Amino acid sequence: MHLSQIVLYLSLLIALGPVVLSDQETHQQQPSATSPIETEQCATCEVRQQIKTMRLNAIKSQILSKLRMKEAPNISRDIVKQLLPKAPPLQQLLDQYDVLGDDNKDVVMEEDDEHAITETIMMMATEPEAIVQVDGEPKCCLFSFTQKFQASRIVRAQLWVHLRQTDEATTVFLQISRLMPVTDGNRHIRIRSLKIDVNAGVSSWQSIDVKQVLTVWLRQPETNWGIEINAFDSRGNDLAVTSAEPGEEGLQPFMEVKISEGPKRARRDSGLDCDENSPESRCCRYPLTVDFEDFGWDWIIAPKRYKANYCSGECEYMHLQKYPHTHLVNKANPRGTAGPCCTPTKMSPINMLYFNRKEQIIYGKIPSMVVDRCGCS
């Protein structure tokens, strides 16, 4: 090989060497190209996550607003345990949640009010005013009505009284009397008297119909001075629990008021449903669970969580916005606000058992809390 050929060969090696190395380094270091479909799906997931976060925040505000509360009641889990009556009507409501959960799929309200509709109120007894007491007695019971409702809407009003157990089978004479100011002379107006046979070693709850007296109180609030409860056995022992003594927490008297429901119910329409892994790009309803324990809301007795759902997806036609939920989607995806928005077109209420600020137990409906169907608007 001539010298000129050797020089040419070496020159080619030097020239080609870096090119080969550069190709290898480029192949090793550059990330694999992302397809347009994967990029679009990633952006869609981001938008959905923003919508979910916004919906959760909106739900917190909506619940307080619909319950006419400026802020959540300051009731801790320990206080809830002390206040919850260990009584049949409350247990029945809790059992409903155990059996039904938050499944509200069969019915919705034809008309939806802006605020919650109360169905049941459980009022704990407080101490009557001094004007009706003689030597500090009686210590029970006054029921204050902070909820505004008409007497004509009362379906049922029951006073629940817990009787202590006795060592032997006996007959108990339970007497309920309305209290009047001592200055009026006769400070008692008898409401009901019951004769109850009880077994030895067994405590029990007794319910007394007080709808008539409650109706009077609602129409003439100035006559509500409270009631006195006595339950004497054959030996003269008063077996009625009228205050929260040690070991008797949750056994004090309370009043259960059932109120007539508002709007009628109708079948719910179904819509397009998707899950988080669905490739569907059209407007669709996605699952979203609201957990009140995550909110730190111990004042909500039941449900502890419920399925709220949310809407997300593409729309092709321009419609008017029907629900406030629409602006949440617009905020999460401002680039898509030029066109129609995927938003709830059908919503339903949830039933809720909760404490209000007066530490009364309320059972009622909160409207427009579950997304049943999504559409473009």
Image (tube, rainbow, N blue to C red):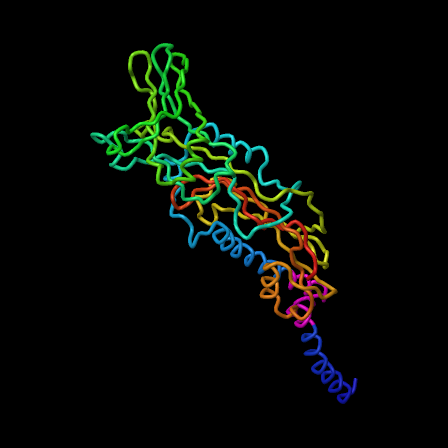
Residue occupying the point 40% across, 48% down: 73
Question: Is 170 in front, or is 292?
Answer: 170
- Residue 69 spot, x, y in % from top left: 44, 52
What is the magenta range? 24-44
Residue occupying the point 75% across, 85% down: 6
Q: Is residue 284 magenta?
A: no
Question: Is 263 in front, or is 275?
Answer: 263
> Based on the displayed image, in which of its 4 quarters is residue 335 positioned?
bottom right
Residue occupying the point 70% across, 57% down: 375
Q: Is residue 36 magenta?
A: yes
Instruction: Report whether 211 appears left or right of 179.
Output: right
Is residue 278 depicted above or below 333 in this figure? above
Our reading of the magenta stretch's main secondary structure is helix
- Residue 194 spot, x, y in % from top left: 40, 18
Q: Outermost residue toward the bottom?
A: 4
> Based on the displayed image, in which of its 4 quarters is residue 132 positioned?
top left
Is residue 269 depicted above or below 312 in this figure? above
- Residue 135 spot, x, y in % from top left: 20, 30
Quadrant that contains the C terminus: bottom right
